[in-house]
Amino acid sequence: MKKLLYILSLSAAFTSCKKWVDVNDNPNSANSTVPTAEQRLPPLTAQFADAYESSGTRAAFLSQQLGVTYAVNNNWNLTRWYSNTSSANWPWQCWYVNAAVNIAPLIVAAEKVEAWHYIGAAKIIKAWGFGTLADFYGMLPYDEFDIADNITPKFDDGAHVQEKVLALLDEAIADLQKTQGPSAPPLSKGDILNKGNVDNWIRLAYGLKARYLNHLSKKAEYNPQAILDAVSKGPQTEAQSSIMQYVDEGPSIPNAAKEALQYTNTGTSARVTKLYVDYLTNNYTGAPTGGSNMADPRILLMIPHTTDKAGNLVRAVGIDMASDLPKTGPLGYTFSTDKNEFSSPDSQYVVLRKTPYAPTAGQRIQSTGTWYTARGAKGLLFTNAEMRFIEAEVKFKQGQAGEALTAYKAGIRAHMSHLGIASGTIDNFLASTSVVQDANNLTLSHIMIQKYLALSYSPELWVDLRRMDFCTDASGNYNEAAGVYKGFKRPSHVFTEAYPNATDWPRRFAVASYEINYNIVRVKEANPNADKPTYLNEPVWWDKK
């Protein structure tokens, strides 16, 4: 759990040795005390982004944005909603070992020079990381996670963690609004996420408050006005969004530390699903349609395409997760340059990575790749698009259909803008009948399905699916007419040990194996069922009605 630093204690009799050790406290070598705040913030941000986006990849498999070629491995298990202790490990390890334990030292270093903006950013990252993983796992160590020599910390329920997270965000806003000390480094010196833009960090904090408060939609304490107030202070534009820009150094320098997380995490086995394709192509029950339909301009960016022998661009077929295919397929494939053909008809399920990396004139394109899985892609960690969809949801529930429609369209626009689609193309699409035009026809499904697309590969999309109860009726059974996420069905190869009943759906992630193996007493104190398969279908605190 903790990165423990074992310090050799020297007795007072060896003061000369102690002085010698002091002399060799190399300022050019990292340890627990030397690095400054501006040196600490970049790796902390990068490690948080890894934990966050890796949680998002796993959520994409659970949430049926991604399928996988057939092989019994962690990703295939995730598509059957089986998050075993092995697949649970990386977000947990990346957050606790690589990120969370480094927050307090950053704050201590920043306090020495009154670098309040660094303290504010650190508190936001702490709130964001713990808030995300509490929603993901349902429970985790918070109060005792950073106590020296305590390798068996108690587990705190997500409700307790959210209370702490909201308080942290308020503290962060106050710190970011302070004037820094005269010797404090400017935030721009160490900020790889928002490039030193203090206003962006403040807006991020308010946006996160809106997100977490909106999670309470099933609870009596749900406060729509508090959510809208936070939304109004969150990111309103693309420039105010918190986006991680990854680096593409080309195929000859495979530096996984710089390339996009989704390029690394999805690899060559991930495939888009039929549900994802259906949502992008408006092929679902109740989808907007009419006489002036227009293809969604995001299709070419979010769904990989290939070319046939005649050079025609062909869209990937999505894996139907409710069919029998995921039980044994689709199979991986290779391409023969000599024969100009693929080794298997399952090549219609196109790989997500661009192949060839840099096609030459006349060379057959095996995959165009996707916007999210390019090596130099952007990580849309928190955007104005999410703000608009939260606003649309709240306004819709308040019966303000006109304002909900405006926010729904603004959310689509914002997401398309992030993907680099020309404003004129966006205007044409938003004016078409492929988008709801009459506020009286707008449904919660329309809003949430568009948010599902805008939050591709985000851990937050699984939160929404759970809050909205997938595509079920009040009894928990799949219901195409009553459900929100039309077409979201239980997979044919569902892990029946965890989901024995038709009303069982994925509600939380497995506890990491480190805790099961070495901290099982504290784990079971928090939840006696934590080592049982059916633990995965137990709702987390905000998911309980």
Image (spheres, rainbow, N blue to C red):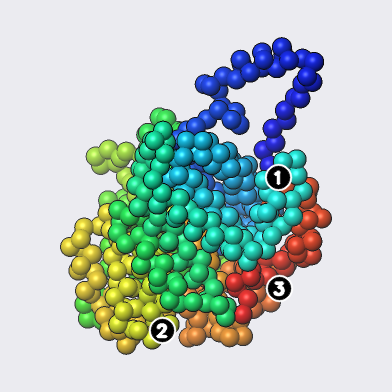
The image quadrant of residue 277 is bottom left
- What's the distance in space between the residues labelled 1 and 2, CA to CA? 45 Å
Residue 440: percent from the left, percent from the top? Answer: 32, 87
Identify the residue at image location x=67%, y=38%. Answer: 3
Find residue 489 and report its horizontal and vertical position in percent. 54, 74
Q: Is residue 269 above or below residue 390?
A: above
Looking at the image, which residue is at 30% across and 82% down?
Answer: 402
The count of marks equals 3
Real-space Cα separation, disc 2 to disc 3, in angstroms: 37 Å
Q: Secondary structure at mark 3?
A: loop
For the point 32% across and 67% down, the residue is 412
Q: Nearer the viewer, residue 192 or 352?
A: 192
Read off the residue under disc 1: 147
Front residue (pair 158, 444): 158
Task: Say what amino acid the circle numbered 3 marks.
Answer: Pro
* N-terminal-most mark, 3 or 1: 1
Left/right placement of residue 309 relative to residue 537 reads left
**145 relative position to 276: left or right:** right
Mark number for residue 500? 3
Q: Amino acid at mark 2?
A: Gln
Q: Is residue 518 left or right of residue 29?
A: right
Image location of residue 44, percent across then percent down: 51, 41
The answer to whether residue 129 of the structure is visible from this angle is yes
Q: x, y percentage for residue 192? A: 40, 41
